[in-house]
Image: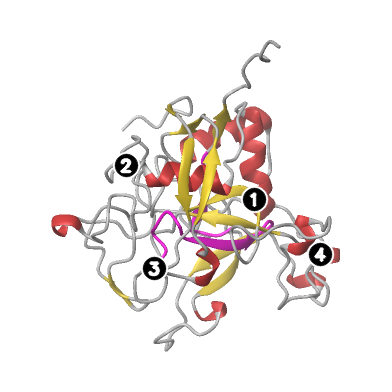
Amino acid sequence: MDASPDDMVALPGGRFRMGSDRHYPEEAPVRWQEVAPFRMDRMPVTNRAFAAFVRETGYVTVAERIPDPALYPGVAPARLKPGGLVFAVRRGAQRPMHWSDWWRYVPGADWRKPQGDSSVYRGRLDHPVVQVAHADALAYARWAGKDLPTEAEFEYAARGGRDGATYAWGEARRPGGRIMANHWTGSYPQAPTAEHGHRGTSPVGVFPANDFGLHDLIGNVWEWTQDYWTGSHDAPACCGSDPAAASRDPDLPEITLPRRVVKGGSHLCHESYCDRYRPAARQPQMEDTATSHIGFRCVIRSPPGPPENG
Protein backbone atom coordinates (compact mmCIF):
# COMPACT_ATOMS: atom_id res chain seq x y z
CA MET A 1 0.00 0.00 0.00
CA ASP A 2 1.43 3.40 -1.01
CA ALA A 3 2.03 5.50 2.10
CA SER A 4 3.61 8.47 0.34
CA PRO A 5 3.39 11.74 2.31
CA ASP A 6 1.95 13.31 -0.85
CA ASP A 7 -0.93 10.81 -1.06
CA MET A 8 -3.90 12.91 -0.02
CA VAL A 9 -7.65 12.77 -0.54
CA ALA A 10 -9.71 15.83 -1.49
CA LEU A 11 -12.80 16.11 0.69
CA PRO A 12 -15.73 18.31 -0.35
CA GLY A 13 -16.67 19.51 3.13
CA GLY A 14 -20.23 20.27 4.11
CA ARG A 15 -22.63 19.96 7.00
CA PHE A 16 -22.76 16.84 9.16
CA ARG A 17 -23.97 15.66 12.55
CA MET A 18 -21.05 15.67 14.97
CA GLY A 19 -20.92 13.74 18.22
CA SER A 20 -23.09 11.06 19.82
CA ASP A 21 -25.81 11.03 22.47
CA ARG A 22 -25.57 7.24 22.91
CA HIS A 23 -22.06 6.67 24.19
CA TYR A 24 -19.68 8.61 26.44
CA PRO A 25 -20.82 11.94 27.92
CA GLU A 26 -17.97 13.97 26.40
CA GLU A 27 -19.29 13.13 22.92
CA ALA A 28 -22.64 14.81 23.53
CA PRO A 29 -24.65 16.60 22.44
CA VAL A 30 -25.04 15.79 18.78
CA ARG A 31 -24.87 19.02 16.83
CA TRP A 32 -24.75 20.18 13.22
CA GLN A 33 -21.23 21.14 12.16
CA GLU A 34 -19.97 22.73 8.96
CA VAL A 35 -16.49 22.12 7.53
CA ALA A 36 -14.94 23.74 4.48
CA PRO A 37 -13.31 21.65 1.72
CA PHE A 38 -9.86 20.31 2.58
CA ARG A 39 -7.38 17.58 1.73
CA MET A 40 -6.28 14.91 4.19
CA ASP A 41 -3.48 12.35 4.22
CA ARG A 42 -4.90 9.05 3.07
CA MET A 43 -3.11 7.29 5.95
CA PRO A 44 -1.39 8.19 9.22
CA VAL A 45 2.17 9.49 9.00
CA THR A 46 4.48 6.47 9.03
CA ASN A 47 7.83 5.83 10.67
CA ARG A 48 9.34 5.95 7.18
CA ALA A 49 7.96 9.44 6.51
CA PHE A 50 8.88 10.72 9.96
CA ALA A 51 12.43 9.39 9.56
CA ALA A 52 12.78 11.43 6.35
CA PHE A 53 11.68 14.55 8.25
CA VAL A 54 14.22 13.90 11.01
CA ARG A 55 17.04 13.23 8.52
CA GLU A 56 16.38 16.47 6.69
CA THR A 57 15.83 18.73 9.68
CA GLY A 58 17.70 17.13 12.58
CA TYR A 59 14.52 17.46 14.64
CA VAL A 60 14.60 16.04 18.18
CA THR A 61 11.23 14.91 19.54
CA VAL A 62 9.84 15.78 22.95
CA ALA A 63 10.36 12.19 24.15
CA GLU A 64 14.08 12.51 23.37
CA ARG A 65 14.53 15.68 25.44
CA ILE A 66 15.06 16.03 29.18
CA PRO A 67 11.75 17.27 30.64
CA ASP A 68 11.68 20.80 32.03
CA PRO A 69 11.48 20.54 35.87
CA ALA A 70 9.38 23.73 35.97
CA LEU A 71 6.55 21.89 34.21
CA TYR A 72 6.54 19.02 36.71
CA PRO A 73 6.50 20.50 40.21
CA GLY A 74 7.20 18.02 42.95
CA VAL A 75 9.00 15.53 40.71
CA ALA A 76 12.63 14.93 41.63
CA PRO A 77 14.90 16.15 38.79
CA ALA A 78 16.69 12.78 38.79
CA ARG A 79 13.42 11.14 37.71
CA LEU A 80 12.95 13.47 34.75
CA LYS A 81 14.46 11.41 31.98
CA PRO A 82 13.68 11.35 28.25
CA GLY A 83 11.12 8.69 27.42
CA GLY A 84 7.49 7.88 26.77
CA LEU A 85 4.48 5.93 28.00
CA VAL A 86 4.28 2.27 26.98
CA PHE A 87 1.27 -0.01 27.40
CA ALA A 88 2.18 -2.77 29.83
CA VAL A 89 -0.50 -4.23 32.11
CA ARG A 90 0.72 -4.60 35.68
CA ARG A 91 0.84 -8.20 36.81
CA GLY A 92 -2.30 -9.06 38.76
CA ALA A 93 -4.38 -6.14 37.40
CA GLN A 94 -7.49 -7.95 36.18
CA ARG A 95 -9.28 -4.73 35.28
CA PRO A 96 -7.34 -1.47 35.20
CA MET A 97 -8.51 1.01 37.80
CA HIS A 98 -5.78 3.62 37.39
CA TRP A 99 -3.68 4.51 34.36
CA SER A 100 -0.55 3.26 36.15
CA ASP A 101 -2.09 -0.25 36.19
CA TRP A 102 -1.64 -0.51 32.44
CA TRP A 103 0.85 2.19 31.43
CA ARG A 104 4.45 2.70 32.51
CA TYR A 105 6.91 5.47 31.76
CA VAL A 106 9.88 3.95 29.94
CA PRO A 107 13.10 6.00 29.79
CA GLY A 108 14.53 5.72 26.31
CA ALA A 109 11.22 5.02 24.57
CA ASP A 110 10.86 7.31 21.56
CA TRP A 111 9.65 7.19 17.97
CA ARG A 112 12.58 4.98 16.91
CA LYS A 113 12.01 2.55 19.81
CA PRO A 114 8.30 2.82 20.70
CA GLN A 115 8.48 0.21 23.46
CA GLY A 116 11.96 1.26 24.54
CA ASP A 117 13.70 -1.68 22.91
CA SER A 118 13.36 -2.91 19.31
CA SER A 119 13.78 -0.36 16.53
CA VAL A 120 11.14 0.62 13.96
CA TYR A 121 13.82 -0.05 11.35
CA ARG A 122 13.17 -3.76 11.95
CA GLY A 123 10.05 -4.26 9.90
CA ARG A 124 7.90 -1.37 11.16
CA LEU A 125 8.76 1.48 8.82
CA ASP A 126 5.26 1.37 7.35
CA HIS A 127 3.52 1.42 10.74
CA PRO A 128 2.19 4.75 12.07
CA VAL A 129 4.79 6.77 13.91
CA VAL A 130 4.06 6.87 17.65
CA GLN A 131 5.75 8.31 20.74
CA VAL A 132 5.19 11.75 19.24
CA ALA A 133 3.90 14.66 21.32
CA HIS A 134 1.63 17.34 19.89
CA ALA A 135 4.58 19.65 19.15
CA ASP A 136 6.30 16.88 17.18
CA ALA A 137 3.23 16.28 15.03
CA LEU A 138 2.87 20.00 14.38
CA ALA A 139 6.58 20.35 13.50
CA TYR A 140 6.25 17.59 10.92
CA ALA A 141 3.09 19.13 9.50
CA ARG A 142 4.75 22.54 9.10
CA TRP A 143 7.79 20.94 7.42
CA ALA A 144 5.47 19.16 4.98
CA GLY A 145 3.58 22.39 4.21
CA LYS A 146 0.48 21.05 5.93
CA ASP A 147 -1.38 21.34 9.24
CA LEU A 148 -3.06 19.15 11.83
CA PRO A 149 -6.80 18.59 11.42
CA THR A 150 -9.36 20.20 13.65
CA GLU A 151 -11.56 17.86 15.67
CA ALA A 152 -14.47 18.61 13.33
CA GLU A 153 -12.39 17.92 10.21
CA PHE A 154 -11.19 14.63 11.65
CA GLU A 155 -14.68 13.45 12.57
CA TYR A 156 -16.14 14.53 9.23
CA ALA A 157 -13.39 12.60 7.41
CA ALA A 158 -13.73 9.54 9.67
CA ARG A 159 -17.47 9.32 9.01
CA GLY A 160 -16.82 8.99 5.29
CA GLY A 161 -20.19 10.52 4.44
CA ARG A 162 -22.15 8.09 6.67
CA ASP A 163 -23.84 10.84 8.61
CA GLY A 164 -24.90 9.76 12.09
CA ALA A 165 -23.64 6.17 11.81
CA THR A 166 -22.11 4.57 14.91
CA TYR A 167 -19.04 3.25 13.09
CA ALA A 168 -17.19 4.56 10.06
CA TRP A 169 -18.61 1.63 8.07
CA GLY A 170 -22.19 1.59 9.42
CA GLU A 171 -24.05 0.25 12.46
CA ALA A 172 -22.69 -3.28 12.84
CA ARG A 173 -19.50 -3.64 14.87
CA ARG A 174 -18.34 -6.49 12.63
CA PRO A 175 -20.39 -6.47 9.42
CA GLY A 176 -20.62 -10.04 8.19
CA GLY A 177 -18.13 -11.03 10.89
CA ARG A 178 -15.36 -8.92 9.32
CA ILE A 179 -13.04 -6.91 11.57
CA MET A 180 -12.91 -3.44 10.00
CA ALA A 181 -10.19 -1.74 12.08
CA ASN A 182 -7.20 -2.52 14.26
CA HIS A 183 -8.70 -2.69 17.74
CA TRP A 184 -8.25 -5.02 20.70
CA THR A 185 -9.69 -8.50 20.27
CA GLY A 186 -10.00 -11.04 23.06
CA SER A 187 -10.41 -10.30 26.75
CA TYR A 188 -9.24 -6.84 27.85
CA PRO A 189 -6.62 -6.23 29.15
CA GLN A 190 -5.00 -9.57 29.98
CA ALA A 191 -5.80 -11.89 27.09
CA PRO A 192 -5.41 -10.38 23.60
CA THR A 193 -6.14 -12.76 20.75
CA ALA A 194 -5.17 -10.56 17.77
CA GLU A 195 -7.87 -12.14 15.62
CA HIS A 196 -6.95 -9.75 12.81
CA GLY A 197 -3.30 -10.83 12.88
CA HIS A 198 -1.76 -7.73 14.47
CA ARG A 199 -0.41 -7.23 17.97
CA GLY A 200 0.08 -3.55 18.59
CA THR A 201 0.13 -1.20 15.62
CA SER A 202 -0.35 -2.51 12.09
CA PRO A 203 1.07 -1.29 8.78
CA VAL A 204 -1.02 1.58 7.46
CA GLY A 205 -3.65 0.70 4.90
CA VAL A 206 -4.15 -2.99 5.69
CA PHE A 207 -7.71 -2.46 6.95
CA PRO A 208 -10.48 -1.30 4.60
CA ALA A 209 -10.70 2.35 3.59
CA ASN A 210 -13.85 4.27 4.46
CA ASP A 211 -16.16 5.65 1.80
CA PHE A 212 -13.89 8.67 1.31
CA GLY A 213 -10.95 6.37 0.57
CA LEU A 214 -9.19 7.12 3.88
CA HIS A 215 -7.48 4.42 5.94
CA ASP A 216 -6.99 3.99 9.69
CA LEU A 217 -8.99 7.01 10.82
CA ILE A 218 -10.57 4.45 13.14
CA GLY A 219 -8.32 2.15 15.17
CA ASN A 220 -4.58 1.47 14.90
CA VAL A 221 -3.52 4.72 16.64
CA TRP A 222 -5.23 7.69 18.23
CA GLU A 223 -4.43 10.86 16.28
CA TRP A 224 -3.66 14.41 17.43
CA THR A 225 -5.93 17.27 16.41
CA GLN A 226 -5.50 21.04 16.67
CA ASP A 227 -8.24 21.53 19.22
CA TYR A 228 -7.81 22.13 22.93
CA TRP A 229 -9.85 19.76 25.07
CA THR A 230 -13.26 20.70 26.39
CA GLY A 231 -15.58 18.46 28.38
CA SER A 232 -18.11 18.65 25.55
CA HIS A 233 -17.23 19.08 21.92
CA ASP A 234 -19.54 22.08 21.60
CA ALA A 235 -18.54 23.74 24.89
CA PRO A 236 -18.10 27.46 24.15
CA ALA A 237 -15.15 29.49 25.37
CA CYS A 238 -16.64 31.55 28.16
CA CYS A 239 -16.11 35.24 28.70
CA GLY A 240 -12.89 35.45 26.73
CA SER A 241 -11.29 32.58 28.65
CA ASP A 242 -8.00 31.09 27.46
CA PRO A 243 -8.83 27.74 25.76
CA ALA A 244 -5.38 26.35 26.58
CA ALA A 245 -5.80 27.12 30.28
CA ALA A 246 -9.38 25.81 30.26
CA SER A 247 -8.16 22.50 28.81
CA ARG A 248 -5.95 21.64 31.80
CA ASP A 249 -6.74 18.61 33.94
CA PRO A 250 -8.68 19.80 37.01
CA ASP A 251 -7.54 16.70 38.91
CA LEU A 252 -3.90 17.78 38.50
CA PRO A 253 -3.97 21.49 39.34
CA GLU A 254 -0.19 21.59 39.77
CA ILE A 255 0.30 20.63 36.10
CA THR A 256 -0.14 23.63 33.82
CA LEU A 257 0.25 21.81 30.52
CA PRO A 258 -2.74 22.10 28.16
CA ARG A 259 -4.58 19.10 26.79
CA ARG A 260 -5.58 18.51 23.15
CA VAL A 261 -8.25 16.32 21.62
CA VAL A 262 -7.18 12.99 20.15
CA LYS A 263 -9.54 11.10 17.86
CA GLY A 264 -10.10 7.74 16.24
CA GLY A 265 -9.32 5.14 18.90
CA SER A 266 -6.40 2.71 18.74
CA HIS A 267 -5.35 -0.93 18.76
CA LEU A 268 -5.95 -0.83 22.53
CA CYS A 269 -9.68 0.02 22.30
CA HIS A 270 -12.12 -2.72 23.33
CA GLU A 271 -15.89 -2.51 23.67
CA SER A 272 -15.76 -3.72 27.28
CA TYR A 273 -13.64 -0.82 28.50
CA CYS A 274 -12.83 1.76 25.81
CA ASP A 275 -15.46 1.54 23.08
CA ARG A 276 -13.88 4.41 21.20
CA TYR A 277 -13.03 3.11 17.75
CA ARG A 278 -15.86 5.30 16.44
CA PRO A 279 -15.91 8.67 14.62
CA ALA A 280 -17.64 10.48 17.53
CA ALA A 281 -15.20 9.27 20.18
CA ARG A 282 -12.74 11.75 21.67
CA GLN A 283 -10.23 11.85 24.49
CA PRO A 284 -7.96 14.45 26.13
CA GLN A 285 -4.18 14.13 26.02
CA MET A 286 -1.57 16.44 27.53
CA GLU A 287 0.41 18.14 24.80
CA ASP A 288 3.77 16.89 26.06
CA THR A 289 2.78 13.24 26.31
CA ALA A 290 4.27 10.70 23.90
CA THR A 291 2.74 7.22 24.00
CA SER A 292 2.91 3.94 22.13
CA HIS A 293 -0.63 4.38 20.75
CA ILE A 294 -0.87 8.01 19.54
CA GLY A 295 0.16 9.20 16.07
CA PHE A 296 -1.18 11.74 13.59
CA ARG A 297 -1.92 12.70 10.01
CA CYS A 298 -2.03 16.05 8.23
CA VAL A 299 -4.40 18.20 6.21
CA ILE A 300 -4.19 21.03 3.70
CA ARG A 301 -7.08 23.45 3.74
CA SER A 302 -8.42 24.83 0.51
CA PRO A 303 -7.53 28.48 0.00
CA PRO A 304 -10.44 30.90 0.15
CA GLY A 305 -12.00 31.81 -3.13
CA PRO A 306 -11.80 35.27 -4.74
CA PRO A 307 -13.93 38.00 -3.17
CA GLU A 308 -17.38 38.41 -4.64
CA ASN A 309 -18.09 41.49 -6.72
CA GLY A 310 -20.54 44.03 -5.46
Identify the mark nearer the N-term, 3 or 1.
1
Question: Which type of secondary structure does the marked residue at label 2 adopt?
Answer: loop
The residue under label 1 is 227
Q: Give how far apart the Cα atoms at labels 1 and 4 are.
A: 21 Å
Secondary structure mostly taken by the magenta-highlighted segment of the chain: loop
Mark 2 residue crowding within 10 angstroms, few (<14) / some (14–19) / many (20+) = many
- Side of 213 relative to 265 (left or right): left
Which amino acid does the dot numbered 1 rest on? Asp
Which amino acid does the dot numbered 4 rest on? Leu
Residue at x 42% of width, y 63% of height: 276
- Residue 25 % position (x, y): 52, 71
> Is residue 185 a member of the stretch shown in magenta?
no
The residue under label 4 is 71
Q: In this view, which residue lies farthest toward the left?
A: 176
As drawn, the label of residue 188 is none
Identify the mark nearer the N-term, 3 or 2.
2
- Residue 260 % position (x, y): 64, 56
The residue under label 3 is 275
Q: Give how far apart the Cα atoms at labels 3 and 4 are.
A: 32 Å
Q: Is 255 situated above or below 95?
A: above
Mark 3 or 4: in front is 3
Over which residues does the magenta segment extend? 276-297
The residue under label 2 is 210
